Structures are given as C-alpha cells and as structure tokens.
Amino acid sequence: MTLGSIRHEIRIHRSAADVWARVGDAAGLHTWFPGITNCQVDGKNRVIMLGSGAPLPEEILVNDDTQRRFQYRITAPIFVHHRGTIDVIALDDQECLVVYSTEADPRTMALTIAGGTAGALDELKRQMETN
C-alpha cells in the first residue's frame, strides 16, 4: 500500500477547550467544513452529505475529549484506506493549534481531500475568532 499523506495546521486565537467543543461535535462538521451540507451520526457511524448531494459514509475511530483528538475513516469503496485526524493542541490559555491530517490509498485521494481540509481550517478559524 502506498499512502498519500497531507497535513495542514492553523493557529486559532481561542482556547483549545472552545475550539474542541466545535471540532469534537461529530454531528456538527457541516457547520465549519465548506462543501458539507449535513451530518448524521449513529453510534460510531457518520454519513456526511456533500454539497453535490452525494452521501459519504464514515466510521468514527476516536473522539477523545482528553487528548482533543477526532479520528475517522471514510468507508466508501473509492478508498482502499483512509484516515483523517484532527488534533486541537493548547498553546496557552487563549490560543491553540489545530492540525488536520489525512492519509489515503489511492494516494491521489489525499490530495483531493487536502483542499477541503485546508478550507475547513480557515473557516474554523474565522468562526472561532469572530464569535
């Protein structure tokens, strides 16, 4: 297996706890990830609805309030392997670093997802720093 791997990170001037409250809400991804219109969560399963109307099934692997880590995998058959990881890391009381990593096979899918994850981090920053 030859994985494609992409990582984006952004500093947000807001507490890690506040940012994690948004990121750790599995059903709320569509509120800060452009191009996703809705999310349905049933236990460890999540289905996101893309702006095109296509559903994308996922399995939630980790949603850890202590580590502030959310990890999932897309289970659609277009992937041999996928894992997305979002970490929220406190830098001080009012600033954090959010790291969004994606690994995928076929490796070109990591590049496809990367544009969306970069945009999502920008939108998360915009929302968290203006509200």
Image (cartoon, rainbow, N blue to C red):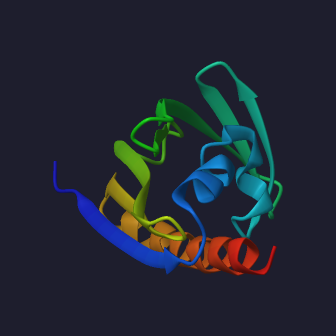
**Image point 38% across, 46% down: which residue?**
83
Residue farthest to the front, as pictured: 93
Q: Is residue 51 above or below residue 22?
A: below
Q: For this rendering, which residue is in front, 16 or 37? A: 16
**Image point 42% across, 46% down: which residue?**
79
Please give left or right for residue 49 compared with residue 87 in the image. right
The location of residue 7, given as percent across then percent down, is: 34, 70
The location of residue 22, given as percent across then percent down, is: 68, 53
The location of residue 38, given as percent across then percent down, is: 82, 49
Residue farthest to the top, as pictured: 43
Instruction: Assign the C terminus to one quadrant of the image.
Output: bottom right
Q: Residue 122's quadrant in the figure?
A: bottom right
Residue 28 in sight in this render: yes
**Image point 41% across, 50% down: which residue?**
85
**Image point 16% across, 48% down: which residue?**
1
Please give left or right for residue 90 compared with residue 59 in the image. left
Q: Residue 26's quadrant in the figure?
A: top right
Q: For this rendering, which residue is in front, 46 or 15? A: 15
Q: Is residue 126 above or below residue 42?
A: below
The location of residue 70, given as percent across then percent down, is: 48, 43
